[in-house]
Image (cartoon, coloured by chain):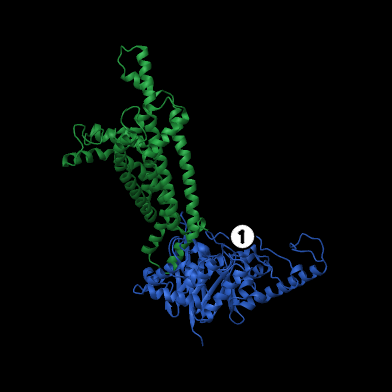
Amino acid sequence: MSKTMLEVNGLTTKYITRFHEDVYAVDHVSLKIEQGKSLGIAGESGCGKSTLALSLMGYYFPPLHYTSGDIIIDGKNISGMDPDEVRRNVLGTEIAYIPQAAMNALNPTRKIYKFIEDVILAHNPKANKKDIYEMARHRFSELNLPLEALDKHAVELSGGMKQRVVIAISTILKPKVLIADEPSSALDVTSQKVVIKMLRDMMDKGFIQAMIFITHELPLLYNVTDDIMVMYAGQIVERGSAKEMVFDPVHPYSRGLMRSILVPEEGTRDAKLIAIPGTPPNLKRPPQGCRFAERCRYAQPACRYNQMPILDFDQGRSYRCGLSVDELREIYRKEDEADAQAVANPVESDGPVRLTKGV
Amino acid sequence: MTKGLKKYLKKKIFWFIVTFIAAIILNFILPRMMPGDPVNAIVGKSISPGATAEQVQEQIAFYKHQFGLDKSLLGQFGDFVKNAAKGTFGVSYNQYPRTVSDIIGSGIWWTIALQLPAILVGWILGNLLGAVAAYKRGIWDKAFMPASLFLSAIPAFGAAVILLVVFAVNLKIAPVNGAYDPGMIPSFTPKFIASVIAHYQLPFWSIVIISIGGQAVGMRSMSIYELNADYVKYARFLGIKDSKIVRYVFRNAMLPQVTGLAMSIGSMVGGALVAETIFSYPGLGMAMLNAIGSSDYPVISAITLIITVMVLLASFLLDIIYAFIDPRVKAAQFE
């Protein structure tokens, strides 16, 4: 029985805008990650993924504020802690963060090893600088990073290298949980691969015990994480294993995310790319009922008024929708059949946009 | 890297020399294009009222020969370069037979003693205030910003005149003009030093006040920009202390401010003109103003040459210094 590395219960955080309005960007989020496991979080921009990443750190600065909920890392609840203590004893050592824009994450006027020195000294003021340097060299060689990078400034490193250096710095103190916020989104495909491989290596080598990987590309997560969670408008709308989520998404939004991205495989040529119409709701005034109802193709009138709780189904899966799982699966089956037929007998129509014409 | 540095320096020095030569030529030509004939002015002042036209002509010819103004423009330029190389810059027309180097020598120390501390104090105070305003925000910042904008909008002569009227004319707690009591002979006696310090205050603060505002506004916006930079957020999430992060931020926010400092030090002599004129401070600015009034070409050329060289040196040194304090610039320039 493996132990739980990160457990989050009902975490709610809000932004307070300049005009003193509350925006709940993370709304009662609960999740659990076992030792050695990874969780992917997917969703459109503006759905609260990055805010969730920030909120999980347990350290808040304006305009983000903590409202309620627990963050328990390896049995230790950090949500009630004094911010200074969080900074000293939690950040970097218990939980670490890889920012969305790793390109700008490094101080441009500080050499890499100097920055590593600052990180380590912040947690262990008595550390010897020579030991730190040796330790950094050792870690860089373990991660197959060039040792010269330590003596360079951020500008002298390539984009992919910067990202890998940031990952190495974030994990220098062997944090239990690593939160990677779109670490590969700004990179080309080759660098993306290297970065993802590096993150998996970190798990295998035991530099981190659990990982959260945030991205807007749901299919990407299939190759990266064990479980996937889909977020919409600050809430979790579906959760399951990576395989289930990619091949059998139940929530209309998860299905929409899967269908709006091209996965190069046989039949892509004839695949339809179906965008989800509309944009996420304004969280200053969240909708009364299901937050996705306005954009949902299958929404019933009641969806707009009834609060949607998150419900468990199957083994370890949960979803948040007014329709039953069976109803949804039936709808999707019919839809897929109709799509297959449309591909077989192409007719000009103003239906969904077809990317390529079949020869 | 050193190879890159050498190449970079070579290129810089080449352009430095080209600019310097162009400056020498312009410094020679431009004053001579001013309206007014220096010799006529001198003769008109010095000759006795009963002199005949012949005597006047004789006098004019004498001075023209003395000053080398009877030579062709090219010949005059040769003299100018020769004298500049010797370091004397020839003889002043207006204060004949005093050499230009003597005039400059007596003024330059007053200018440096007034300007350099004033520029440094204004720069340091302005940057400190701007940084604190950016870091503290709130009330402090709300009061501070308009005040800085107001200060930076005051023209140089405005600040000087206001100080003069308030402290010297109305309150009578500071002397009106000069660098020391006119009845005194410069010496290292306590009395003389006290007089110098008393005369120093108004011109000094008039320069400090106008430079604080601009520096503070610049530093504030740079600091706010840096405080919101991604690296600040990242450093926080790694548990690095605020005291350390603030040091990162202000070090980086300072970088563009260093340019401002170097430029004001470089243009010190030109900047001195206003304050020195209003307070009749015996520096290079005053010397320059007097020389312009009497078409004293050698003095004008020499002082403008000093200004040019100082600005050139400042920007040259700045380029070198910058490469060492900002790795981004180094990466861009030396490779």
Residue at 81 percent of width and 61 percent of height: A348
Residue A277 visible in the displayed image: yes
Colour of chain B, in one word, is: green
Q: Picture coordinates of residue B164 (x, y %)?
A: 28, 34
In front: B121, or B196? Answer: B196
Q: Residues within 10 Å of mark 1 (few under 14, many from 20)?
A: few
Q: Picture coordinates of residue B233 (x, y %)?
A: 45, 63
Chain designation of label 1: A
Residue at 38 percent of width and 32 percent of height: B298
Amino acid carrying mark 1 in the image: Thr
Disc 1 secondary structure class = loop
Q: Quadrant of residue A41?
A: bottom right
Which chain can be seen in blue?
A
Q: Quadrant of residue B52?
A: top left
Q: Picture coordinates of residue A54 (x, y %)?
A: 48, 67
Q: Picture coordinates of residue A193 (x, y %)?
A: 60, 72
In front: A278, or B209? Answer: B209
In front: A214, or B103? Answer: B103
Q: Is residue B150 left or right of residue A19?
A: left
Can you identify the residue that label 1 sits on?
A279
Residue B71 drawn above or below residue A195: above
